[in-house]
Image: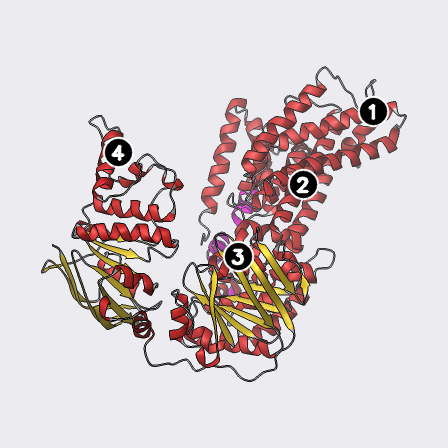
Amino acid sequence: MVKIEMKGIKKSFGSNQVLKEVSFSIKGGEICALLGENGAGKSTLMNILGGVHTLDAGTILVDGKEVEFKTPGQSQDAGIAFIHQELNLINDLPIYENMFLGREIKTKRGLLDLEKMKQETTDMFQKMQVDLDPDMMVGDLDASYKQIVEICKAMMMNGSVMIMDEPTTSLTEQETERVFKLMRTLKEHNVGIIFISHKLNEVMEVCDRYVVLRDGCLVAEGSVSEVSTDDLAQYMVGYEVRTESLRRERTIGTEILRVEGLSCEPYFRDIHFSIRAGEIIGFTGLLGDGRSELFQAIFGAEESTSGKMFLHGKEGTMKNTTQAIRAGIAYVPRNRKENAIIKDMNIFENASIVTWPQFARRGIIDRKRHEDVFHKQRQALRIKMEMLTDRIDSLSGGNQQKVVLAKWLVSDPKLLILDNPTQGVDVGAKEDIYDIILKLSDVGIAIVVLSSEAQEIIRVCDRALVMYHGVIQGEVAGEEMTEHQIMKLATGGKEG
Amino acid sequence: MVQQLDKGRNLLTWFKYKWMNAPLFSTAIALIIMILLQTLVLGFDYDSFGSWFQAWTNNWINILRNNASIGIIALGMTLVIMTGGIDLAVGSTLVATGALSMILLDTGTKGILGMVGVTGVPAFLITIVVVLIFGYLLGALIGVTVTKGNVPPFIVTLGAMMIFRSVTQHFMQGYNTKVPVEFLQIASFKIGSYMIMPIIYWAIIAYILYFVSKRTTFGRQVIAVGSNERAAKLSGVNVDKVKLRVYALMGLLVSIAAIIQVSRVGSMDFSNAGRGVEMDAIAAAVVGGTSMMGGRGFILGTVYGMLIIAVMNNLLNLFGVPPFLREAFKGFIVIGAVLLQRKEKTS
């Protein structure tokens, strides 16, 4: 039985120390949960084990022998299989070809030996008690079977330790069960599994042992049978609460937006909430909870939604984003690079694109007026930049985000939706952005903050709605709004 | 870099800086070289400066006039490519709209306007308006299929290319048409002693589109859509509308080119006219610095690109390069231009 030990692992990226002497071990035939909030160091630790990153200090022992993993290949040769969240499967190839991708079996004449590959795949599926036809196209499989194919593929390469990075985030309960069944089979075959997950209920169900990381340190480990989900949530968050709320007393105005029974399968269903002028509400949850899709639907960027939406008391859903902007909705998307920045345009154009039609005279962009309003925003938001005509990607992440924010504020919104507003933004700029959010709410804008960071939600929001798998799992406000409580709801727990 | 520029100390540094950073610099240099070559090849074997200048001017007017309609099409193609699309149907749209002008104007028995008794200038005006609308609608049809039908532009316009020409040829077979001689004035009206109307049309359209692409909401939204469609949509750009309008505009420009062509020759060969125009238009855009990935393109660059290709054709002609080999030179120019442009920052 294999045993892998990592001792005193240290790793820094620049001045940021991500791992501070972490020790971790896994042996064959056990399933160990690796827990921690975003940024706790889980991925870095696993990337070191998988040969993606090199370690700064510490040792890795495989069966007591010291090894060095400089490339993913070396790690694979030692029997470690890293199953990433984004699967490495090709949808347009059948299962058996995917199983042998990059190390195809060939006949003597150099052609692919399809029969042999198919046979070996069938054998592996039998061994793993998986009921799948090797001829099926991977694209036709649901997410759980894709996971299963990926796992079996790793087994083909004689994997003895498997790192599974949030394998169940996008799965339904039934699909999750299927993956768990395979995990238990693997365990019987003496494979060790490192299970990274945010879903504590699942951890309780399938894992033997747990390890919790927080801020690059190992803070708790032990047997799963001795703890509750509450304990685990507390370990992850830590006791010290550094997140005093920034909220003050304010007057709340009339209702801006009310949503009744909004659904868009498979992302979210039956959403009810309302928001008033001057209010800041948070939407939080884990990856795949559907909150981004929900607000993109409200903003008119996604089609095919059902349910009712009332803006200023008037019913009507948004057909496209142009209409939404006219109705006074602004949406600052997540993943700035993909969704907000247009890299072929300069700073000025990126900062004014939203209001071109609004300010234009006979279709001609009113450059002067845009410059005037942007100049004001630039001072208010303290954007650090040189020339308006500079490339947008010459700015730092925080300043790019402020430019994106500026283009929306110019449009004079009544409802401002901020999806992960502090993503990829340094600490100073983060505080700036919180400051701006509070100021905006003071002038009567209704603000929705979407974030996966509970601390952020607590810091700026009046109340928070926690989503889990496309439904609103619960609402927290005031004293109840703690990281612990939010984490509990976000992992599928009930209120109380 | 900039400080060195201000001091003007070093021409080489300035040149390098421009070469790396000004997108149209290398294209402009190439064009200047072409013009110099053209002038050299023409020679100085003339009695006086006046006659040399006369020959030089005539040579240029010929080049420009012969390329005006493709030049106009290339301008529209630039906008289409800037959105990340392509239009292969321009050649077929050209014959379709050209055919319509014939049907309306024919001096034989079949001319519709002639049959209802409208002739002369009113007939010409009606023809122009109807043909322009028709071209616009054909383009819009392509645009609707691309946006609402969600079919890749390559496929839609490939299909449209076959359909438009085939239908035109079917209905126009054995249809020996002639337009009124007065209609030819549209292209051959002389200013002074020069037949430069097509060049003027080209110049006006180029200027308008240059302005549109630089200064108007629509023009800038075209770039936004081509550069990052998702971000454009999430910034309130009606992506479908922008694309639709680009293809419709393309159709409109092609119909203008069709009118110019018809009024130059007085008729149209429906099976051969406009064949390969799409490729020439794409080549001009690409040589002019337009990125096939979308998001980056220059109206002015396309004019340069068109001129570079045209001058090169003229040179090959003067050098007596065999006709079959000329295409190869065009191919080298296209690839070479993109190789040069790759030196610019790509991120």
Q: Are marks 2 and 4 on the same chain?
A: no
Q: Are marks 1 and 4 in contact (CB under 8 Å)?
A: no
| Residue A174, x across and y down, in percent | 36, 52
Q: Quadrant of residue A411?
A: bottom right
The mark found on residue A118 in the picture is: 4
- Distance (Cα) linking label 2 and label 1: 26 Å
- Distance (Cα) linking label 2 and label 4: 52 Å
Which residue position holds label 2? B248
Of B288 and B313, which appears nearest the observer? B288
Query: The residue tagged with tag 1: helix, strand or loop?
Result: helix
Q: Amino acid at mark 3?
A: Ile
Mark 2 surroundings within 10 Å by alpha-carbon count, few (fewer than 14), some (14 through 19), many (20 or more): many
Callout 3: chain: A
Query: The residue tagged with tag 2: helix, strand or loop?
Result: helix
Callout 4: chain: A
Q: How is the image coloured?
A: secondary structure
Can residue B21 be found in the magenta stretch?
Answer: yes
Q: Quadrant of residue A163?
A: bottom left
Residue in view at x 48 percent, y 80 percent: A478
Q: Are marks 1 and 4 on the same chain?
A: no
- Distance (Cα) linking label 4 and label 3: 46 Å
Can residue A40 be found in the magenta stretch?
Answer: no
Q: For the magenta stretch, what is the residue range?
A: B7-31
| Residue A62, x across and y down, in percent | 13, 58
Q: Is residue B306 left or right of residue A239?
A: right
The quadrant in which the N terminus of chain A is found is bottom left
Q: Amino acid at mark 1?
A: Ile
Which residue position holds label 1? B112
B131 relative to A257, above or below: above
Mark 4 surroundings within 10 Å by alpha-carbon count, few (fewer than 14), some (14 through 19), many (20 or more): many
Q: Earlier in the sequence, mark 4 or mark 3?
A: 4
Disc tally is 4
